[in-house]
Amino acid sequence: MKSLFNYILILFLFSSFSNLSAEGNMKLNLMPMPANVTVNEGKFLLTPSFTIAIQGKASDDFYSYATRVLRRISGRTGLFFPQDFLTKENNPISAPMIINCERLGKVELNEDESYTLTVTNSDIKLNATTDIGAMRGLETLVQLLQSDESGYYIPAVTIEDAPRFRWRGLMIDVSRHFMPLDVIKRNLDAMASVKMNVFHWHLSDDQGIRVEVKSLPKLNQLGSDGMYFTHEQIKEILAYAKARGIRVIPEFDIPGHSTAFLTAFPQLASAPGPYKIERNWGIFDPTFNPTIEATYKFFDTFFKEMCALFDDPYMHIGGDENNGKQWNNNKEIQTFMKKHNIPDNHGLQAYFNQRISKIITKYGKKMVGWDEIQHPNLPTNIVIQSWRGQKGLVDAATKGYQVILSNGYYIDLIQPTDFHYLNDPIPFNSPLTDEQKKFVLGGEVTSWAELVTPENIDSRIWPRTAAVAERFWSPQTVNDVEEMHRRLECVSFMLEDFGLLHIKNQPMMLRRLTNNNDTAPLKTLIDVIEPVKLYARHSQGVKYTSYSPYTRVVDAALPDVKIKRTLDKLIEKYIADKDEQSYNQLKDLFTTWQNNHSKFVELIKVSPILKEMEPLSNNLAIISKRGLEAIEYIKKGDNPLDNWFGDVQKDLDAAKKPYGQTEIMIIPQIEKLVNKVKV
Ligand code: ACM
């Protein structure tokens, strides 16, 4: 128990929350970091008399936004502000905080989102060209909130801010696993809080059509499993997003990834049906037949309804991973290609895209698609979403296509935050000319949903996406990883204000995993492990489907666990200083992990779902013992016995093996310690 207490104490000491009680510490907890920040002498103390006045032009949505911000500040501080709801009618002439917007903003590409925020001892002024810019400024204000023994305050600052990129998106796949309205809403709130402005809604895939299509009711009767958003719900989300300055781009993935469409309309496929909604994950054969007129008649009806339903000028048509098998095996399609001098499947897909482009242009939209839609036969007024590599982005921009980067932002692949953070849509060494760089609109984080459910999706998206939001908004030179981690932790807990479950749901999942027994041994284990990365979960002998349980330890385990960084620092300090305090802290940690195994084994007896983790828990105990030996040798300056290094390496190598699709994350740190033992 004592060692567990010490462990918590160490985590606390290393936590950045101490920055919240500023005490001469003027580190701001802003993310994204504004373009220009000057910290001045003084602070604006928040008192119960705090009020906000809105001047200039602002939409009703903005008044509501300001009201929500007032409530958030009130909620964080416990201060009873006198102001109830800000409306045009209920808006004081003067107030300690004055917001001034020159004009109403339009929620569209290229809108001005700049703002300036000036805080002095006596007042706060937020000025913006548009009320959308003022929304961005209000989020900065909330993040500036600090406290000390005198109470809550906003430090005196002068901030001038504007985004680096105009397209800062998050894609959520609601086809593989359906995500109800609440999931979308809380993620929109989180996006707005880190100044993201595009919600890309992946609404169709092999596993389901997730939008009501009134003109083609069979799509929902046969292709949705009853799980889709009605027109009313879609409109609700569009309004919710608009009220937060966020555009919504729907995606209907065609001509591949279309099993659900073809389940309802098998006559439009390139091979005879029947088809069934796909329950597995991967790339599948069913593909629309691009050579028959019935296909385009269908899409005319479909896009007529969808283009009217969604109000953004952009419509995403997917276009990725068409494996071409059905096209290769269809004689009529092959004959069609010869007759029209179409040399290959890429050319045939370009023919299909040209026809689709005509349809959506007729209904007032511009086309967006994944890398694969790029083809010389397509006009350059389409937007390419580059997912296969930076090369695709460079290719597209060089050829004059507007482009957004998603390669490197696949947030479902459980990669560390710094990997995503340092991935830049236009890196310092970009081969693009200044003229070509203008075609790079920005980027999008993608949250594919094979391995997530509404229960754990937030923990996959957040907080790492906030770091990417900074990449999209802040100057390119804001790239200090350690500083990013410090601020990210502050932003992460603030996201909970919107009902985000990325922190809150793990304890619940652990209670279920332990059958409501003591979760402590599982918590100790889960804090040092992560799910395996990239696509490894699909190649380790577990066959996942859309109806598999996503409730195992791997699903509760979090990406990018903090202990790696905590341990790194502790070990560095111990190696450098050989100090008693670092020694004791390391000893406590290793002892906790070593002793955890016997407790974990007891837990397995009452909760067999944990059985798959037993070897990993055992390995953690073994390598922790090695860690203890290493700190002891270093402390005493002793040489270990001849075969010690070899035996340790064997243990560390064995501990690298994943179990339950999870892996121990502290092995490099122990290796570093072992390497410091005298030979
Ligand atoms: C994709 O990841 N298939 C766009």
Image (tube, rainbow, N blue to C red):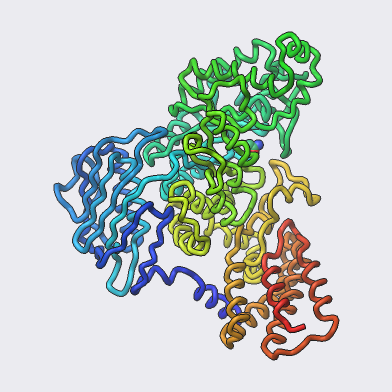
Q: Residue at x 51, y 62 (%)?
A: 485
Depicted 17 relative to depicted 199: above or below: below
Q: Where is residue 293 in the image (x, y as percent from the top left)?
A: 65, 10
Q: Residue furthest left?
A: 93
Q: Is 41 left or right of 626, judged from the image as shown? A: left
Q: Is 80 left or right of 308, judged from the image as shown? A: left
Q: Is 516 left or right of 186, judged from the image as shown? A: right
Q: Position of residue 569 (x, y in %)?
A: 58, 73
Q: Residue furthest top?
A: 339
Quadrant of the snapshot with the N terminus:
bottom right
Q: Quadrant of ligand 1?
A: top right
Q: Is 73 left or right of 426, judged from the image as shown? A: left
Q: Residue at x 75, y 47 (%)?
A: 538
Q: Position of residue 217 (x, y in %)?
A: 58, 21
Depicted 638 relative to depicted 292: above or below: below
Q: Which one is nearer the viewer's eye here, 478 or 464? A: 478
Q: Which one is nearer the viewer's eye here, 185 or 360? A: 360
* Quarter-of-image position of residue 571: bottom right
Depicted 522 relative to depicted 131: above or below: below
Q: Which residue is drawn at 42% across and 47% down?
A: 195
The total of numbered circles placed on residues is 0
Quadrant of the snapshot with the C terminus:
bottom right
Say if residue 199 shows up in the picture. no
Q: Where is residue 233 in the image (x, y as percent from the top left)?
A: 47, 33
Q: Which residue is drawn at 69% across and 85% down?
A: 634
Q: Which one is nearer the viewer's eye here, 468 or 206? A: 468
